[in-house]
Amino acid sequence: MADRLGVGFVGAGFNTNFHARSWVGVRNADIRGIADPDTSKAEATARACRNLGVGDPKAYADVSELVADPNIDALWICAPNYTRIAIMETIAEVLKSGKGTLKGIACEKPLARNVAEAKKMVEIVNELGLLHGYLENQVFSPSIVRGREIIWHRGAKVTGRPYLARAAEEHSGPHESWFWSGQQQGGGVLNDMMCHSIEAARFLLSDPDKPKSAMRPVTVNAEIATLKWSRKEYIDLLKEMYDNRIDYGKTPAEDFARANINFEDQDGNILVAEVTTSWSFVGPGLRLSFEMMGPEYYMQINSLEPELHIFFSRKVVGKAGEDLVEKQAAEQGLMPVISDEGLVYGYTGEDRYMVNCFLEGKMPEENFNDGLLVSQLLMTAYKSSEEGKKLAFDPAAIQDFVPKVARGTYRATDAIHTAF
Ligand SMILES: NC(=O)c1ccc[n+]([C@@H]2O[C@H](COP(=O)([O-])OP(=O)(O)OC[C@H]3O[C@@H](n4cnc5c(N)ncnc54)[C@H](O)[C@@H]3O)[C@@H](O)[C@H]2O)c1
């Protein structure tokens, strides 16, 4: 086993900075390079890594230079969804030219914008013979990991397996223009955030003593709508925020989505994942909630009910910020504070796990194949909402499917014209 892993970040935005901060809880790995076409961001993130003591990374403008750097053993792809395939093709080109010494690639959620692209990601990484990890932080979140462990080892053992998992992720809207663009992101909130909820619910419902394949998706029933951001004042706000590049009067994306996914286990039990996401929730900040139920037990998690709350009276007037919680919406009153977001959301556990797998030469349990399955479920959910009916899960039926939202043909009024 190698002693230390040299890690390169691809992209130096919001998400990369979460990984950098979480790295203080990761052993045996250093951040040694960061590539971003916006070199000022690469340099700023490199400085942040040095200040955190998690490495002394070189800043690159181009991914090919990062891959060719002999100090880099693994990449964390944290660039926007629309850059995935080009990045993987660049990695392949550099490695095939004989440069670079990569062992593995970890890629942020969602694996890609649609199934065809997700398949391409799997194809390229397999062709290169590299280890691969799918960065779904929620399945490493300490409360989810611990809750699942206790439920399965105590409750399920005595009274039977759990049958219903609920997962939700909600906030007031993303932080960069490309997330709002159906074409660039691959969809709206369903693609952006239901990927988390689906994988968290699948993780909770799956038997830790059995392979993941012991639970297979059978049907998907979903609905999307644009509840807030298609209102005139919010269309105008988006135009103002992004210099008219985002026009939800013409090409909206959904800001609400819900799906019921039915799974079946090897004993023929029906298991339900009820997932819902929105960009139309204005509360103290990002809210993650989870529940799991079985015959004689249940568990619950709500990230906005942490152990720390801070109260500021109306006389405490300061700048707007996100120092209390991600997507914070207010600075006064009684406010929940998440004291270590990277830890609570699962980044620290995720990064530590991926590093250990790559050092040990072991394929991570959460890998690109899981990212592909999540993509297949997301696309089936879009298809179900477009057709207004519950669909059988059939990967062949969605292999070339691109949602209307991503094609620019979805209209905010579609939700009321599609009957179930
Ligand atoms: N796990 C989570 O909870 C979570 C949270 C946020 C974002 N994400 C995911 O992380 C990814 C990045 O999101 P973000 O919020 O950091 O976005 P962002 O827009 O804040 O940052 C993206 C960065 O990538 C850079 N970039 C653009 N093209 C690039 C290329 N070809 N090569 C390298 N860098 C490039 C941009 O200049 C920017 O600095 C997305 O796929 C997103 O879905 C995951």
Image (cartoon, grey):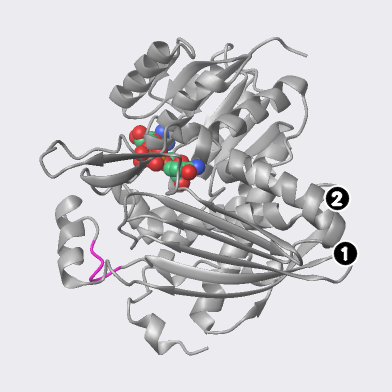
Which residue lies at the image location 55% right of the left edge and 18% below the top edge? 68
Asked if residue 28 shows in the view, the reply is: yes
**SS under mark 1:** loop
| Magenta-span inclusion, residue 37 | no
Q: Is residue 41 above or below residue 203?
A: above
Give the class, few, some or many, for how many residues have Cα within 10 Å of label 2's Cα (few <14, many ≥20): few
Q: Is residue 178 left or right of residue 260?
A: left
The reply to whether dot 2 and dot 1 touch (C-beta < 8 Å) is: yes
| Magenta-span inclusion, residue 249 | yes
- Front-most of residues 250 and 54: 54
Ligand 1 lies in quarter: top left
Q: Position of residue 219 (x, y in %)?
A: 68, 74
**SS under mark 2:** loop
Residue type indicated by callout 1: Gln
Residue type indicated by callout 2: Lys
Q: Position of residue 85 (x, y in %)?
A: 53, 44
Q: Position of residue 351 (x, y in %)?
A: 59, 29
The quarter of the displayed image where residue 102 is located: top right
User: Disc 1 beta carbon < 8 A from ligand 1?
Assistant: no
Give the class, few, some or many, for how many residues have Cα within 10 Å of label 1's Cα (few <14, many ≥20): few
Query: Which residue is disc 1 drawn over?
Result: 266
Which residue lies at the image location 16% right of the left edge and 59% below the top edge? 237
Which residue lies at the image location 56% right of the left edge and 37% below the top edge? 346
Q: Is residue 395 left or right of residue 18?
A: right
Residues at marks 2 and 1, CA–CA distance in whole angstroms:
10 Å
Q: Which residues are magenta?
A: 247-251
The quarter of the displayed image where residue 215 is located: bottom right
Q: Earlier in the sequence, mark 2 or mark 1?
A: 2
- The circle drawn on residue 210 is 2
Asked if residue 67 shows in the view, the reply is: no
